[in-house]
Image (cartoon, helix red, strand yellow):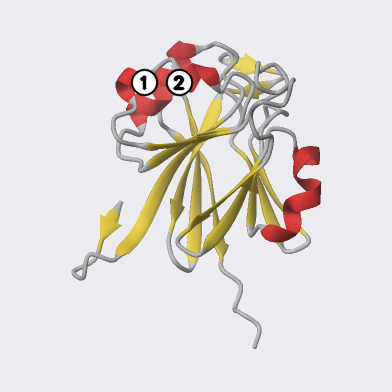
Amino acid sequence: MILDNNNSLQVYKILLMSDTHGNNKFLRKSIKNENDVDAIIHLGDSYEDLLYNEDILDDKEIFYVPGFFDSGYIPNTVEHVKLINIMGWRFLMCHSLEECIEERENADVIFHGHTHRASIFQKDDRYIINPGHLKNAYDRGNQASYAVVEIFEDVIKIHWKELEGKELSFSEIKKKAESA
């Protein structure tokens, strides 16, 4: 979190991860790489991994949704879809993109996992972001990755990173002008 001279929030940083599948070594490495984030979001398939590593979470905000292999998925004891608001942006979180369909109209950005493939695309004026996976060094032909999301009032910067913290790619989303 970075504040201006008036103590107003200028940037909010999120570590975005998905599909750890019990790989606490990779989870811990990504958290240690990005220790300056304000929050951590886990998009399922083993969100409990995050909770088992509380010793390195410090005072970070924690958000998560279950994946298909999580105990809270069935019998539906953990919300499958969550909407959070940060700095005027609305983020919808789900494991599988199909789970977000009904609520997509409420979001500016959708975070999802499941495919194990880091990606960003735009559909119906919404950006859809997948951080990749932290299951193994490679899974389904995709290198292990996570994303760091920097949220500003008028722009979002997304940095996809490999396990050692080296940037793999970068994208930027500019906020749409409000309609009169």
Q: Quadrant of the C terminus?
A: bottom right
Is residue 73 found left or right of 171 in the rendered image? right
Mark number displayed over residue 54 = 1
Q: Are marks 2 and 1 in contact (CB under 8 Å)?
A: yes
Q: Residue furthest bottom?
A: 180
Q: Position of residue 76 (x, y in %)?
A: 72, 26
Q: Which quadrant of the structure image shows residue 176?
A: bottom right
Element type at mark 1: helix
Residue at left offset 44%, top offset 12%: 25
Residue at left offset 31%, top offset 22%: 56
Q: Is residue 103 above or below residue 44?
A: below
Type of the residue with mark 1: Glu
Are there few (<14), some (14-19), or many (20+) residues within 10 Å of tag 1? few
Is residue 135 found left or right of 164 in the rendered image? right
Question: Which residue occupies the foreground of this view, 84 or 124?
Answer: 84
Q: Position of residue 63 (x, y in %)?
A: 50, 37
Report which residue position mark 2 lands on.
51
Report the Cα–Cα distance between label 2 and label 1. 6 Å
Residue at left offset 39%, top offset 17%: 53
Element type at mark 2: helix
Type of the residue with mark 2: Leu
Number of numbered discs: 2
Q: Position of residue 72 (x, y in %)?
A: 65, 21
Are there few (<14), some (14-19), or many (20+) residues within 10 Å of tag 2? few
Q: Position of residue 77 (x, y in %)?
A: 66, 26
Q: Is residue 158 above or below residue 90?
A: above
